[in-house]
Structures are given as C-alpha cells and as structure tokens.
Image: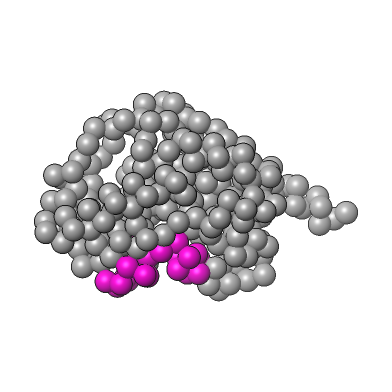
Amino acid sequence: MVQLHGLSSSRRRDELFGLDLTADRPGLQVLRFDARGHGHSTGSADPGDYTWPVLAHDLLALLDEVFPGTGVHGVGQSMGAATLLTAAVAQPDRFASLTLGIPPTAWEWRREQSRAYELAARQVERWGGARWAELTRQPTTSPAIDPGRPVTAPDVADEWLPAAFRGAAATDLPSRAEVAGLEIPVLILAWPDDASHPLEVAELLADLLPDARLEVARTPAEVAAWPQRVEGFVRDHAAEGAAESTT
C-alpha cells in the first residue's frame, strides 16, 4: 500500500489530526511519504511544482522504485486523494484499489477554493505560516471533525508554503470522462459540512466511478473507525486479486 497526506500536512501532522488512514493496522505493508515541500521533503518556491499532475508524477516514480511492476492499493486524503486519482488516470495498471479520503474541491467547486488559496499565499508571505494559521483559524463546521483535535501550523516551510498554495490554486482533477473510465475498486470516505472537502464532490465521484462505494462519517467516532474500514476494503480486494491470479 501507499498512503498520501493533504495540502500543508505531512505524515506527522496526519497522525496528530487523526487522519492516518492506516493507523494501528499492523497487518498492512504501507509506504508513507511526505509530498514535495511538506514535512521532511525538500521543496521549491515554484508553484508549478505543487500541482496534482506533478505530485502524481512524483508518486508514480516512487512506486517504480519501491514496488516495481506491482499494483498497489492507494490511500490518500484531500490533496493525497486528488494525487491518487490523477496518477490512476495516467497509469491505471499501477493501482489495485483506491481509498479517497475527504476528496477536495474539484471542477465547478474548485474556482472559489482557488481564490482562497491565492489569498492564503499572500497572507503567508506577509505573516508567515504559523501566524497565518493562528489568525485564520475557524471553528470546525463538520460534526465529524473532533473539535478537540490539536491546533498546528502548516508542516511546510514559509519559503515554500505560498508556492504550495498557488500550485493548489492552479490545479484540478482530470476530466469527468477520464475519471469515469477508471475500472478500479474505489472506497470514498467523506464527511459533511466542510467547504474545502464538499460532500457533493464525494457523491459525484461515487456516481462517476464504475466500481465505487461512498461512506459518510458524521461523528468523530466514525472517522476514528476509518483505518479499520480501509483495512477491510483493501483485504477484500487483495483477496479478489489473488483469486483472479490463480484462475
């Protein structure tokens, strides 16, 4: 398996937020890594380095190195989910299944979010990432988000964070038709009332993808159960793949 995090996050920050979607599942072999410019990975001040196609290229190159010639089960949330979808459209044979956690805005929902990212980039240039996080912090809106989760600054260096936001502002998912052509089992994990991760996008993806199921968490306890749901989904499809390979 390979697992990806969200924009301005990292492996460490996902753990703090309770969004490590394979946490405490010791039977799974999971490759986790920090996207370029995030966590412990190096980055740049070029917004073009943070678009979803570039991040998808990074992912596919890493899979070629670590799991050559093997179909993997991809797991990601937010930007990580978008990166997985983009990579799967480019090279569908590299993936045995996809788990898309809280898919981000896309298509007609992307325009407003892009404006918000451009504003965030300018604010970070003025205040720095930690001060930006403090001044723009808002109460959680989704009932599924634990209101007591830790408050942390972006896990991206100030010199790279504006570019990461502008790269996100400039990118989008592949077309609906390309997404609809993916013959890969997909589990979509979503929650309601989050403008950055609209339930409408998750529902549309569930309609577009030929072999997808959508599960909506409405409490923090249901979100905490997501790693168990991911493990069950992956094991089911790993078993199916093994059965097909022997027939």
Say whether residue 236 is left or right of residue 113: right
- Magenta-tinted stretch: 38-59
- Judge whether 30 appears above or below 99 on screen: below
Q: Position of residue 149 (x, y in %)?
A: 29, 36
The N terminus: image quadrant: bottom right
> Image quarter for residue 96?
bottom right
> Image quarter for residue 170?
bottom left
Any magenta on residue 44? yes
Give the residue at x 62% y 44%: 208
Any magenta on residue 43? yes
Give the residue at x 88% y 54%: 247
Give the residue at x 52% y 51%: 75
Say whether residue 221 is left or right of residue 158: right
Say whether residue 45 is left or right of residue 247: left
Q: How is the image coloured?
A: one colour
- Judge whether 55 appears above or below 76 on screen: below
